[in-house]
Each structure stands twice: as C-alpha cells, then as structure tokens.
Image (cartoon, rainbow, N blue to C red):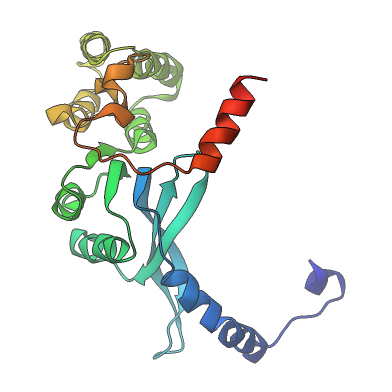
Amino acid sequence: MMFQNYALFPHLSLAENVAYAVLDKVREWQSRALDRMYPFVLFGALRVKIRDADSRTFKNKAVYAALGVTRDGSREVLGLWISENEGAKFWLSAINELKNRGVQDVLIAVVDGLKGIPKAITAAVPDAMVQTCIGHLVRHSLNFCSWKDRKVAAAGLRRMLSAPTADLAEAELDAFVEKWARKYASIAPAWRRGMAGGNSVLCFRSGDPENHLHHKCYRKPEPRDPEINQKAWLLRHR
C-alpha cells in the first residue's frame, strides 16, 4: 500500500536482500519443535508462481502445507514445502519430517482426493484416521449439479453431514442417491469412498463421550500441568 500511494516500486534486489536477511529466522521456524499430538492436521497444497533460481523465470509450483489444530483449538502451520508437483511420495517425506520434529500422534488427518496420501499418512502415523476433506467432497458434488438443483442437493448433503450417527448418515446418503442417482450418478460414489472403511468423522456419535476422539483406547494420555489444572478448577468453581 505504501509503495502504491507514493508510486515507489522496490527493485528486485531489495526483495532479495530482505529475503536473505530473514533466512536464518525462516530456517529456525522450519526446524522448530512441535507438539507430541495434534487432534487435527490438514494437508494440502497451493499452486503459486515462484521465481526459479536456475532459470530466473517464474514457474508454477506447489507449496505444500500442513496445518495443525492444537488441543486448545488454535491453528498452527506445522510446515511449508515447495515442489513442482503434489504426490504421495513427497507427503511421506514431509510427514516423516514432522515426526522427526516431535509429532507422534494425529487423531484425524484431513486430505484432498489425491490417491496415495492416505497410505503415506498411515505408514508414518498408523493410528491416524484419514478423512477426505468435506469441502472437496461438497465442491466435487455440486460441480455435477445444474444451477437450479444446487440448493436442493446441498440441503440433502447438509442433512447427511449433520446426522448424529454414522447409520443415520448412511440412510441420508441412500435417500440422496435415490433422489439424484439417475440425474447425477457420479456424486454418490465419491461419498461412498470418503466414508469407506470407517475412516470418516461421521462414525463418531454426537454427544457420546465414550466414543469421543479423546477416549480412544490407543491414545496415550500426556502428563497434565498442575498449574493449568488449578486454573481450570478455579474457573469452574467461581
């Protein structure tokens, strides 16, 4: 904004000097220690234009990102990586890097529809539940619908996603298929794949503490901070 207001356009060398000035901070951030467990980690990639150091030209490259949600609900960018293409092999190396920085467990890993990513995640974090991104599934589904049908189809998907149990979600999906199968036959298979094998957040019953993520028997509890417990007790008994 300052450059636009005063008609100042920094030279490319200035941008390079600024980048080199913070390079040590960037490397420190890239190698920082991470939490032992994250309830949710979202894996994805963005396509951006980046100036190639060898050819000095701008190329389309993928910036891989891992976004973690901590136990207190805050979001943290765990890592950023640059590659020309998004692939399962690269994700395996990225996830192993996160493990080397301290991540031992992930409850739910949210991914896009790229084949091979679920296997890469479960190979590195065997207990992680892999969930296909709901946003990807909804967009994929509505892309098949005509404009006049989108609102009604979205309402049907909403009923399925808001179902309190996996069985009711399955029933809502069956009702959706019965209504739209002839007109939009490609929608249901995507949701079937996303919900296959129990690898869906819909298998957790709403309001059922025994089936809550934090009550899964294979999760190892972390030692609690006595000071935090004391503060929580004071807040509850005010």
Residue 6 spot, x, y in % from top left: 87, 75
- Pick the quarter of the image with the N terminus: bottom right
In the depicted structure, whether residue 132 falls above or below residue 15: above
Q: Quadrant of residue 194?
A: top left
- Pick the quarter of the image with the C terminus: top right
Q: How many marks?
A: 0
Residue 24 spot, x, y in % from top left: 52, 83
- Asked whether 188 or 171 is in front, the reply is 171
Say which residue appears at 43% left-offset and 71% top-offset.
30
Q: Quadrant of residue 211?
A: top left
In the depicted structure, whether residue 129 falls above or below residue 156: below
- Asked whether 87 or 47 is in front, the reply is 87
79 left or right of 124 in image: right
Residue 120 spot, x, y in % from top left: 17, 54
Residue 177 spot, x, y in % from top left: 22, 14
Say which residue appears at 31% left-offset and 39% top-offset.
221
Say which residue appears at 57% left-offset and 87% top-offset.
20
- Asked whether 45 or 155 is in front, the reply is 45
Q: Quadrant of residue 156?
A: top left
- Asked whether 69 or 115 is in front, the reply is 69
In the depicted structure, whether residue 151 falls above or below residue 56: above
